Amino acid sequence: MSLFIRSAHVITMAEGTSSSPQVLDLRIEGQDIVAIGSDLQPEPRDEILDGRDRLVTPGFVNAHTHSWETVYKGRYDNMPLELWMLYTYPLLGAPPRSPDFVRVRSQLFALESLKSGVTTIVDDVLETPSQDFGQLEAVVDAYERIGIRANVSGHVINVPFVDTVPFAADHLPAEVLHAVRNESLLSAGEYLDYSEQAIRRYHGRGEGRLHYMLAPSAPQRCTPDLLSGAVALAGRHGIECHIHMLETKTQAITGQEFYGMTLPQYLESIQALSRNTTFAHGIWVTDQDIEILANHSASVSHNPISNLKLGSGILPWRKYRDAGVNLGLGTDGCSSSDTPRLLEVIKMASLLHKIGDSDPAAWPSVDETLRAGTLDGAKSAMLDRTVGSLEVGKRADLLVWDLNTLNFTPRQKLDHQLVYSENGSSLEYVMVDGRIVVDHGALTTLDEQEIVDEFNGYLPEIQAWQDRTDELNTVFHPAFSAMYETCRQAPLDINRWAGTADSVLTP
Ligand SMILES: [Zn+2]
Protein backbone atom coordinates (compact mmCIF):
# COMPACT_ATOMS: atom_id res chain seq x y z
CA MET A 1 0.00 0.00 0.00
CA SER A 2 1.16 3.54 -0.63
CA LEU A 3 -0.42 6.59 0.95
CA PHE A 4 0.05 10.28 0.26
CA ILE A 5 -1.06 12.68 3.02
CA ARG A 6 -1.36 16.11 1.48
CA SER A 7 -0.89 19.39 3.36
CA ALA A 8 -1.43 18.07 6.87
CA HIS A 9 -0.42 19.73 10.13
CA VAL A 10 2.52 17.53 11.05
CA ILE A 11 4.44 17.19 14.31
CA THR A 12 7.47 15.13 13.30
CA MET A 13 9.21 15.11 16.72
CA ALA A 14 12.46 14.71 14.75
CA GLU A 15 15.59 15.72 16.63
CA GLY A 16 16.15 19.47 16.31
CA THR A 17 12.51 20.31 15.56
CA SER A 18 9.95 21.70 17.98
CA SER A 19 6.55 20.17 18.68
CA SER A 20 4.71 22.99 16.97
CA PRO A 21 3.29 21.55 13.74
CA GLN A 22 4.24 22.47 10.21
CA VAL A 23 2.11 22.04 7.11
CA LEU A 24 3.73 19.19 5.18
CA ASP A 25 3.09 16.38 2.72
CA LEU A 26 3.98 12.88 3.75
CA ARG A 27 4.37 9.76 1.62
CA ILE A 28 4.25 6.21 2.97
CA GLU A 29 5.18 3.15 0.97
CA GLY A 30 4.87 -0.29 2.47
CA GLN A 31 6.11 -0.09 6.04
CA ASP A 32 8.15 3.08 5.58
CA ILE A 33 7.93 6.83 5.50
CA VAL A 34 9.59 7.56 2.15
CA ALA A 35 9.10 11.33 1.82
CA ILE A 36 8.20 14.33 3.97
CA GLY A 37 8.28 17.89 2.72
CA SER A 38 6.43 20.76 1.11
CA ASP A 39 4.92 20.55 -2.36
CA LEU A 40 5.63 16.86 -2.86
CA GLN A 41 3.88 15.03 -5.68
CA PRO A 42 2.02 11.76 -5.16
CA GLU A 43 2.90 8.70 -7.23
CA PRO A 44 0.14 7.57 -9.61
CA ARG A 45 -1.01 4.61 -7.49
CA ASP A 46 -0.98 6.47 -4.15
CA GLU A 47 -4.10 6.66 -2.09
CA ILE A 48 -4.56 10.35 -1.18
CA LEU A 49 -5.58 11.66 2.25
CA ASP A 50 -6.45 15.35 2.42
CA GLY A 51 -4.55 16.69 5.44
CA ARG A 52 -5.95 20.21 5.64
CA ASP A 53 -8.12 19.50 8.67
CA ARG A 54 -5.85 16.87 10.12
CA LEU A 55 -2.96 16.65 12.54
CA VAL A 56 -0.38 13.90 12.03
CA THR A 57 1.90 12.84 14.87
CA PRO A 58 4.13 9.89 15.70
CA GLY A 59 2.38 7.05 17.55
CA PHE A 60 2.81 7.03 21.31
CA VAL A 61 5.40 4.81 22.95
CA ASN A 62 4.35 3.37 26.30
CA ALA A 63 7.78 2.95 27.87
CA HIS A 64 6.68 0.90 30.87
CA THR A 65 3.72 -1.38 31.38
CA HIS A 66 2.71 -4.88 32.48
CA SER A 67 -0.03 -6.54 30.41
CA TRP A 68 -0.52 -9.09 33.20
CA GLU A 69 -2.28 -6.41 35.27
CA THR A 70 -5.12 -6.11 32.75
CA VAL A 71 -7.03 -8.57 34.92
CA TYR A 72 -6.82 -6.22 37.92
CA LYS A 73 -8.13 -3.01 36.38
CA GLY A 74 -10.03 -1.05 39.04
CA ARG A 75 -9.63 -3.73 41.72
CA TYR A 76 -7.40 -2.06 44.34
CA ASP A 77 -7.01 1.42 45.79
CA ASN A 78 -5.16 3.18 48.58
CA MET A 79 -2.31 0.74 49.08
CA PRO A 80 1.39 1.60 48.80
CA LEU A 81 3.49 -0.50 46.42
CA GLU A 82 4.78 -2.87 49.10
CA LEU A 83 1.27 -3.92 50.12
CA TRP A 84 -0.36 -3.63 46.70
CA MET A 85 2.21 -6.06 45.24
CA LEU A 86 1.11 -8.78 47.66
CA TYR A 87 -2.24 -8.91 45.85
CA THR A 88 -1.42 -7.94 42.27
CA TYR A 89 1.59 -10.28 42.15
CA PRO A 90 0.48 -12.87 44.73
CA LEU A 91 3.22 -14.91 46.38
CA LEU A 92 0.89 -17.77 47.21
CA GLY A 93 -1.82 -19.56 45.30
CA ALA A 94 -1.70 -18.01 41.82
CA PRO A 95 -2.29 -20.75 39.25
CA PRO A 96 -0.18 -20.64 36.06
CA ARG A 97 -2.20 -19.11 33.23
CA SER A 98 -2.85 -21.12 30.08
CA PRO A 99 -1.35 -19.81 26.82
CA ASP A 100 -4.87 -19.34 25.41
CA PHE A 101 -5.79 -17.08 28.30
CA VAL A 102 -2.48 -15.18 28.05
CA ARG A 103 -3.13 -14.62 24.34
CA VAL A 104 -6.57 -13.06 24.85
CA ARG A 105 -5.39 -11.05 27.85
CA SER A 106 -2.58 -9.60 25.74
CA GLN A 107 -4.94 -8.89 22.87
CA LEU A 108 -7.33 -7.03 25.15
CA PHE A 109 -4.48 -4.92 26.46
CA ALA A 110 -3.10 -4.23 22.98
CA LEU A 111 -6.58 -3.39 21.71
CA GLU A 112 -7.09 -0.68 24.31
CA SER A 113 -3.57 0.61 23.75
CA LEU A 114 -3.95 0.87 19.97
CA LYS A 115 -7.35 2.54 20.19
CA SER A 116 -5.83 5.28 22.33
CA GLY A 117 -2.92 5.91 19.95
CA VAL A 118 -0.23 3.77 21.58
CA THR A 119 1.65 2.10 18.73
CA THR A 120 4.56 0.69 20.78
CA ILE A 121 4.36 -0.98 24.16
CA VAL A 122 7.22 -1.94 26.42
CA ASP A 123 5.51 -4.88 28.05
CA ASP A 124 7.33 -6.19 31.09
CA VAL A 125 5.07 -9.22 31.23
CA LEU A 126 5.77 -10.47 34.77
CA GLU A 127 3.80 -13.69 34.65
CA THR A 128 3.03 -15.08 38.11
CA PRO A 129 4.12 -17.55 39.49
CA SER A 130 6.64 -17.79 36.61
CA GLN A 131 6.78 -17.63 32.84
CA ASP A 132 7.33 -20.47 30.39
CA PHE A 133 7.83 -20.41 26.63
CA GLY A 134 4.19 -21.29 25.99
CA GLN A 135 3.07 -18.13 27.80
CA LEU A 136 5.75 -15.93 26.23
CA GLU A 137 4.87 -17.29 22.78
CA ALA A 138 1.20 -16.45 23.45
CA VAL A 139 2.03 -12.78 24.14
CA VAL A 140 4.20 -12.52 21.03
CA ASP A 141 1.54 -14.25 18.95
CA ALA A 142 -1.17 -11.88 20.27
CA TYR A 143 0.84 -8.80 19.34
CA GLU A 144 1.86 -10.25 15.99
CA ARG A 145 -1.78 -10.81 15.06
CA ILE A 146 -3.20 -7.54 16.38
CA GLY A 147 -0.48 -5.49 14.71
CA ILE A 148 1.09 -3.55 17.59
CA ARG A 149 4.84 -2.96 18.06
CA ALA A 150 6.22 -4.30 21.34
CA ASN A 151 9.19 -5.16 23.46
CA VAL A 152 8.11 -8.26 25.37
CA SER A 153 10.00 -9.42 28.41
CA GLY A 154 10.89 -12.44 30.27
CA HIS A 155 10.63 -10.92 33.74
CA VAL A 156 12.65 -12.51 36.51
CA ILE A 157 12.90 -12.37 40.28
CA ASN A 158 15.51 -14.80 41.58
CA VAL A 159 15.63 -13.89 45.26
CA PRO A 160 12.82 -15.08 47.59
CA PHE A 161 10.41 -12.17 47.64
CA VAL A 162 10.37 -11.82 51.42
CA ASP A 163 14.13 -11.23 51.24
CA THR A 164 13.85 -8.38 48.73
CA VAL A 165 12.69 -5.94 51.41
CA PRO A 166 14.25 -5.22 54.77
CA PHE A 167 12.50 -5.72 58.12
CA ALA A 168 9.70 -8.06 56.90
CA ALA A 169 11.00 -11.64 57.15
CA ASP A 170 11.46 -11.52 60.92
CA HIS A 171 7.78 -10.83 61.41
CA LEU A 172 6.48 -13.73 59.33
CA PRO A 173 5.32 -17.09 60.73
CA ALA A 174 8.06 -19.73 60.31
CA GLU A 175 6.00 -22.03 58.07
CA VAL A 176 5.10 -19.17 55.70
CA LEU A 177 8.71 -18.11 55.52
CA HIS A 178 9.73 -21.69 54.83
CA ALA A 179 7.14 -22.03 52.05
CA VAL A 180 8.16 -18.86 50.19
CA ARG A 181 11.88 -19.44 50.63
CA ASN A 182 11.51 -22.94 49.20
CA GLU A 183 9.96 -21.85 45.91
CA SER A 184 12.30 -22.80 43.09
CA LEU A 185 14.04 -19.80 41.57
CA LEU A 186 16.00 -19.44 38.34
CA SER A 187 19.76 -19.21 38.49
CA ALA A 188 21.44 -16.47 36.46
CA GLY A 189 22.59 -19.09 33.94
CA GLU A 190 19.08 -20.48 33.52
CA TYR A 191 17.55 -17.05 32.95
CA LEU A 192 20.24 -16.04 30.47
CA ASP A 193 19.79 -19.35 28.57
CA TYR A 194 16.04 -18.78 28.51
CA SER A 195 16.62 -15.26 27.19
CA GLU A 196 19.09 -16.41 24.50
CA GLN A 197 16.49 -18.88 23.30
CA ALA A 198 13.73 -16.27 23.45
CA ILE A 199 15.83 -13.91 21.35
CA ARG A 200 16.34 -16.64 18.74
CA ARG A 201 12.65 -17.55 18.70
CA TYR A 202 10.85 -14.22 18.93
CA HIS A 203 13.16 -11.33 18.18
CA GLY A 204 12.08 -9.71 14.91
CA ARG A 205 8.75 -11.51 14.64
CA GLY A 206 5.83 -9.61 13.09
CA GLU A 207 8.08 -8.25 10.30
CA GLY A 208 10.44 -6.78 12.86
CA ARG A 209 7.84 -5.24 15.17
CA LEU A 210 8.45 -7.57 18.08
CA HIS A 211 11.54 -7.66 20.24
CA TYR A 212 12.44 -9.73 23.24
CA MET A 213 13.48 -7.70 26.28
CA LEU A 214 15.59 -8.67 29.29
CA ALA A 215 13.88 -7.73 32.54
CA PRO A 216 15.54 -8.44 35.85
CA SER A 217 12.82 -7.17 38.19
CA ALA A 218 14.93 -4.85 40.36
CA PRO A 219 18.46 -4.67 41.83
CA GLN A 220 17.27 -6.01 45.20
CA ARG A 221 15.16 -8.75 43.58
CA CYS A 222 17.92 -10.42 41.53
CA THR A 223 21.38 -11.81 42.11
CA PRO A 224 24.31 -9.67 40.93
CA ASP A 225 25.43 -12.21 38.31
CA LEU A 226 21.95 -12.18 36.80
CA LEU A 227 21.81 -8.37 36.72
CA SER A 228 25.20 -7.88 35.09
CA GLY A 229 24.64 -10.86 32.78
CA ALA A 230 21.30 -9.48 31.59
CA VAL A 231 22.72 -6.02 30.90
CA ALA A 232 25.63 -7.55 28.98
CA LEU A 233 23.34 -9.81 26.93
CA ALA A 234 21.07 -6.87 26.06
CA GLY A 235 24.16 -4.94 24.95
CA ARG A 236 25.32 -7.78 22.68
CA HIS A 237 21.94 -7.90 20.93
CA GLY A 238 21.21 -4.17 20.91
CA ILE A 239 17.97 -4.68 22.85
CA GLU A 240 16.48 -3.21 25.99
CA CYS A 241 17.19 -4.35 29.53
CA HIS A 242 14.35 -3.13 31.72
CA ILE A 243 14.77 -2.82 35.51
CA HIS A 244 12.58 -1.32 38.25
CA MET A 245 14.49 1.05 40.47
CA LEU A 246 13.84 3.39 43.38
CA GLU A 247 10.11 3.52 43.02
CA THR A 248 9.54 4.00 46.75
CA LYS A 249 11.15 5.32 49.89
CA THR A 250 11.31 1.72 51.13
CA GLN A 251 13.52 0.88 48.15
CA ALA A 252 15.86 3.79 48.90
CA ILE A 253 16.23 2.44 52.42
CA THR A 254 16.66 -1.09 51.02
CA GLY A 255 19.76 0.00 49.09
CA GLN A 256 21.31 1.33 52.26
CA GLU A 257 20.30 -1.69 54.36
CA PHE A 258 21.40 -4.35 51.85
CA TYR A 259 24.43 -2.82 50.16
CA GLY A 260 25.37 0.26 52.19
CA MET A 261 24.96 2.39 49.11
CA THR A 262 22.27 3.63 46.77
CA LEU A 263 20.87 1.20 44.20
CA PRO A 264 22.43 3.03 41.21
CA GLN A 265 25.80 2.96 43.01
CA TYR A 266 25.30 -0.74 43.57
CA LEU A 267 24.45 -1.39 39.91
CA GLU A 268 27.50 0.58 38.84
CA SER A 269 29.67 -1.49 41.20
CA ILE A 270 28.50 -4.75 39.58
CA GLN A 271 28.66 -3.43 35.97
CA ALA A 272 24.94 -3.52 35.44
CA LEU A 273 24.46 -0.17 33.73
CA SER A 274 24.58 0.72 30.05
CA ARG A 275 22.88 2.60 27.22
CA ASN A 276 20.57 -0.41 26.92
CA THR A 277 19.23 -0.18 30.46
CA THR A 278 15.96 1.57 31.23
CA PHE A 279 14.93 2.06 34.81
CA ALA A 280 11.25 2.17 35.59
CA HIS A 281 10.34 4.91 38.10
CA GLY A 282 13.67 6.31 39.40
CA ILE A 283 11.96 8.55 41.98
CA TRP A 284 14.08 8.24 45.11
CA VAL A 285 17.43 9.17 43.56
CA THR A 286 20.23 11.31 44.89
CA ASP A 287 21.87 13.93 42.70
CA GLN A 288 24.82 11.59 42.42
CA ASP A 289 22.55 8.76 41.29
CA ILE A 290 21.29 10.96 38.47
CA GLU A 291 24.90 11.64 37.47
CA ILE A 292 25.64 7.91 37.46
CA LEU A 293 22.68 7.21 35.16
CA ALA A 294 23.70 10.08 32.89
CA ASN A 295 27.30 8.85 32.72
CA HIS A 296 26.14 5.44 31.54
CA SER A 297 23.55 6.92 29.12
CA ALA A 298 20.82 4.89 30.83
CA SER A 299 17.16 5.86 30.40
CA VAL A 300 14.39 6.28 32.94
CA SER A 301 10.74 5.53 32.32
CA HIS A 302 8.59 8.02 34.22
CA ASN A 303 5.17 6.73 35.31
CA PRO A 304 3.50 9.64 37.07
CA ILE A 305 -0.06 8.29 37.25
CA SER A 306 1.05 4.98 38.73
CA ASN A 307 3.35 6.81 41.13
CA LEU A 308 0.44 8.96 42.30
CA LYS A 309 -1.94 6.04 42.69
CA LEU A 310 0.51 4.08 44.84
CA GLY A 311 1.64 7.22 46.68
CA SER A 312 5.23 6.45 45.65
CA GLY A 313 6.54 9.97 45.15
CA ILE A 314 7.39 12.40 42.37
CA LEU A 315 10.32 11.94 40.02
CA PRO A 316 12.72 14.92 39.92
CA TRP A 317 11.96 15.74 36.29
CA ARG A 318 14.08 18.87 35.87
CA LYS A 319 17.14 17.39 37.55
CA TYR A 320 17.08 14.42 35.17
CA ARG A 321 16.58 16.67 32.15
CA ASP A 322 19.36 19.01 33.22
CA ALA A 323 21.70 16.05 33.66
CA GLY A 324 20.85 14.80 30.16
CA VAL A 325 19.16 11.57 31.26
CA ASN A 326 16.73 10.31 28.62
CA LEU A 327 13.15 10.13 29.99
CA GLY A 328 10.36 8.05 28.47
CA LEU A 329 6.80 7.90 29.78
CA GLY A 330 4.82 4.87 30.85
CA THR A 331 1.38 4.07 32.12
CA ASP A 332 2.63 1.13 34.21
CA GLY A 333 0.17 -1.74 34.53
CA CYS A 334 -3.61 -1.52 34.70
CA SER A 335 -3.66 -2.29 38.41
CA SER A 336 -1.57 0.74 39.42
CA SER A 337 -2.94 3.11 36.80
CA ASP A 338 -6.06 1.38 35.49
CA THR A 339 -5.67 2.39 31.84
CA PRO A 340 -3.04 2.08 29.09
CA ARG A 341 -3.89 5.53 27.65
CA LEU A 342 -0.52 7.22 27.35
CA LEU A 343 -1.95 10.59 26.37
CA GLU A 344 -3.19 10.94 29.95
CA VAL A 345 0.33 10.28 31.19
CA ILE A 346 1.73 12.92 28.85
CA LYS A 347 -0.78 15.41 30.25
CA MET A 348 -0.04 14.36 33.83
CA ALA A 349 3.71 14.75 33.29
CA SER A 350 3.08 18.19 31.79
CA LEU A 351 1.09 19.28 34.85
CA LEU A 352 2.57 17.47 37.82
CA HIS A 353 6.00 19.08 37.83
CA LYS A 354 4.54 22.58 37.87
CA ILE A 355 3.82 21.78 41.52
CA GLY A 356 6.73 21.88 43.90
CA ASP A 357 8.94 24.30 42.02
CA SER A 358 7.74 27.87 41.82
CA ASP A 359 10.11 28.72 38.97
CA PRO A 360 8.15 28.39 35.70
CA ALA A 361 11.43 27.99 33.81
CA ALA A 362 11.77 24.57 35.47
CA TRP A 363 8.34 23.35 34.39
CA PRO A 364 8.08 20.77 31.61
CA SER A 365 7.24 22.12 28.18
CA VAL A 366 4.77 20.42 25.86
CA ASP A 367 7.68 19.79 23.54
CA GLU A 368 9.49 17.86 26.29
CA THR A 369 6.55 15.74 27.39
CA LEU A 370 5.37 14.95 23.86
CA ARG A 371 8.94 13.96 23.03
CA ALA A 372 9.08 11.78 26.14
CA GLY A 373 5.86 10.09 24.96
CA THR A 374 7.26 9.41 21.49
CA LEU A 375 10.92 9.70 20.44
CA ASP A 376 12.49 9.57 23.90
CA GLY A 377 10.32 6.58 24.77
CA ALA A 378 11.57 4.91 21.59
CA LYS A 379 15.14 5.69 22.67
CA SER A 380 14.55 4.05 26.02
CA ALA A 381 13.17 1.00 24.18
CA MET A 382 16.21 0.88 21.85
CA LEU A 383 13.84 1.53 18.93
CA ASP A 384 14.66 5.12 18.01
CA ARG A 385 16.27 4.15 14.72
CA THR A 386 12.96 2.65 13.67
CA VAL A 387 10.17 4.71 15.25
CA GLY A 388 9.38 7.58 17.65
CA SER A 389 9.47 10.39 15.07
CA LEU A 390 8.24 10.96 11.54
CA GLU A 391 11.36 10.91 9.39
CA VAL A 392 12.27 9.49 6.01
CA GLY A 393 13.57 5.96 6.46
CA LYS A 394 11.64 5.27 9.63
CA ARG A 395 8.69 2.91 9.90
CA ALA A 396 5.28 4.55 9.52
CA ASP A 397 3.91 4.40 13.07
CA LEU A 398 1.66 7.43 13.16
CA LEU A 399 -1.60 8.95 14.30
CA VAL A 400 -4.04 11.04 12.28
CA TRP A 401 -6.21 13.39 14.36
CA ASP A 402 -9.38 15.09 13.15
CA LEU A 403 -9.08 18.83 13.78
CA ASN A 404 -12.80 19.46 13.24
CA THR A 405 -13.61 18.37 16.77
CA LEU A 406 -14.46 20.38 19.87
CA ASN A 407 -11.13 19.42 21.42
CA PHE A 408 -9.31 21.32 18.65
CA THR A 409 -11.82 24.19 18.50
CA PRO A 410 -10.73 26.92 18.31
CA ARG A 411 -7.46 25.95 16.66
CA GLN A 412 -4.71 27.56 18.67
CA LYS A 413 -1.46 25.78 19.39
CA LEU A 414 -2.21 22.29 18.16
CA ASP A 415 0.59 20.59 20.11
CA HIS A 416 -0.69 22.19 23.33
CA GLN A 417 -4.25 21.20 22.49
CA LEU A 418 -3.15 17.64 21.82
CA VAL A 419 -1.68 17.44 25.32
CA TYR A 420 -4.11 19.57 27.31
CA SER A 421 -7.45 19.42 25.42
CA GLU A 422 -7.50 16.11 23.57
CA ASN A 423 -8.77 12.89 25.15
CA GLY A 424 -8.29 10.50 22.26
CA SER A 425 -11.74 11.00 20.79
CA SER A 426 -10.37 12.92 17.77
CA LEU A 427 -8.24 9.98 16.63
CA GLU A 428 -9.16 8.99 13.09
CA TYR A 429 -6.41 6.59 12.10
CA VAL A 430 -3.76 4.66 13.96
CA MET A 431 -1.03 3.29 11.74
CA VAL A 432 1.64 0.80 12.74
CA ASP A 433 4.33 -0.26 10.27
CA GLY A 434 2.48 1.40 7.39
CA ARG A 435 -0.77 -0.44 8.10
CA ILE A 436 -3.93 1.23 9.40
CA VAL A 437 -4.80 -0.83 12.48
CA VAL A 438 -7.51 1.45 13.88
CA ASP A 439 -9.89 3.22 11.51
CA HIS A 440 -12.31 5.67 13.15
CA GLY A 441 -12.21 3.78 16.41
CA ALA A 442 -12.53 0.30 14.88
CA LEU A 443 -9.75 -2.28 14.99
CA THR A 444 -9.03 -3.52 11.46
CA THR A 445 -6.84 -6.52 12.20
CA LEU A 446 -8.98 -8.72 14.47
CA ASP A 447 -12.58 -8.92 15.58
CA GLU A 448 -12.73 -6.65 18.61
CA GLN A 449 -15.95 -8.07 20.00
CA GLU A 450 -14.57 -11.58 19.77
CA ILE A 451 -11.58 -10.55 21.92
CA VAL A 452 -13.82 -8.95 24.54
CA ASP A 453 -16.26 -11.88 24.58
CA GLU A 454 -13.48 -14.45 24.81
CA PHE A 455 -11.83 -12.54 27.64
CA ASN A 456 -15.11 -12.18 29.51
CA GLY A 457 -15.62 -15.92 29.23
CA TYR A 458 -12.69 -16.30 31.63
CA LEU A 459 -14.02 -13.76 34.11
CA PRO A 460 -15.72 -16.05 36.66
CA GLU A 461 -12.58 -18.18 36.80
CA ILE A 462 -10.33 -15.10 37.12
CA GLN A 463 -12.36 -13.59 39.90
CA ALA A 464 -12.47 -16.87 41.78
CA TRP A 465 -8.69 -17.20 41.90
CA GLN A 466 -8.27 -13.49 42.62
CA ASP A 467 -10.56 -13.81 45.63
CA ARG A 468 -8.62 -16.87 46.71
CA THR A 469 -5.17 -15.28 46.34
CA ASP A 470 -6.36 -12.08 48.05
CA GLU A 471 -7.38 -14.20 51.00
CA LEU A 472 -4.25 -16.39 51.06
CA ASN A 473 -1.81 -13.52 50.78
CA THR A 474 -3.25 -11.52 53.66
CA VAL A 475 -0.87 -13.67 55.71
CA PHE A 476 1.95 -11.35 54.58
CA HIS A 477 0.03 -8.18 55.23
CA PRO A 478 0.94 -7.52 58.90
CA ALA A 479 4.69 -8.06 58.33
CA PHE A 480 4.77 -5.96 55.17
CA SER A 481 2.64 -3.31 56.84
CA ALA A 482 5.09 -3.13 59.75
CA MET A 483 8.01 -2.91 57.32
CA TYR A 484 6.27 -0.17 55.37
CA GLU A 485 5.63 1.80 58.59
CA THR A 486 9.28 1.47 59.65
CA CYS A 487 10.40 2.88 56.32
CA ARG A 488 7.66 5.48 56.19
CA GLN A 489 8.78 6.90 59.51
CA ALA A 490 12.52 6.64 58.90
CA PRO A 491 14.08 10.07 58.71
CA LEU A 492 15.19 10.73 55.17
CA ASP A 493 16.69 14.07 54.37
CA ILE A 494 14.65 14.73 51.32
CA ASN A 495 11.73 16.86 50.41
CA ARG A 496 10.56 14.83 47.46
CA TRP A 497 7.49 16.96 46.97
CA ALA A 498 9.65 19.96 46.21
CA GLY A 499 12.28 17.87 44.51
CA THR A 500 14.93 20.21 45.82
CA ALA A 501 16.90 18.16 48.32
CA ASP A 502 20.46 17.23 47.44
CA SER A 503 20.46 13.74 48.87
CA VAL A 504 17.97 11.06 49.80
CA LEU A 505 19.94 9.83 52.73
CA THR A 506 20.72 11.46 56.00
CA PRO A 507 24.44 11.46 56.72
ZN1 LIG B 1 6.37 -1.79 36.78
Image: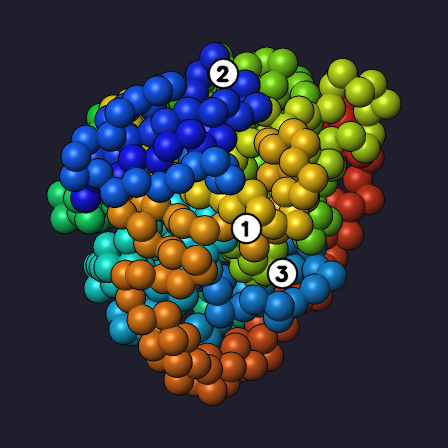
Q: How is the image coloured?
A: rainbow
Q: Earlier in the sequence, mark 3 or mark 1?
A: 3
SS of the residue under disc 1? loop
- Rendered residue at 38%/56% (across/down): 439
Q: Nearer the viewer, residue 48 or 320?
A: 48
Mark 1 vs mark 2, foreground winner is 1
Q: Is residue 439 left or right of residue 192?
A: right
Q: Is residue 134 visible?
A: yes
- Give the alpha-carbon distance from disc 3 to disc 1, as whole Å: 35 Å
Nearer the observer: mark 2 or 3; the answer is 2
**Quarter of the picture holding the N terminus:** top left
Total number of numbered discs in the rendering: 3
Question: Callout 2: 10 Å neighbours few (<14), some, many (20+)?
Answer: few
Calculate the distance from the C-alpha at mark 1 to the C-alpha at mark 2.
24 Å
The quarter of the displayed image where residue 209 is located? top left
| Number of other residues with Cα within 10 Å of mark 3, as a class: few under 14, some 14 to 19, many 20 or more | some
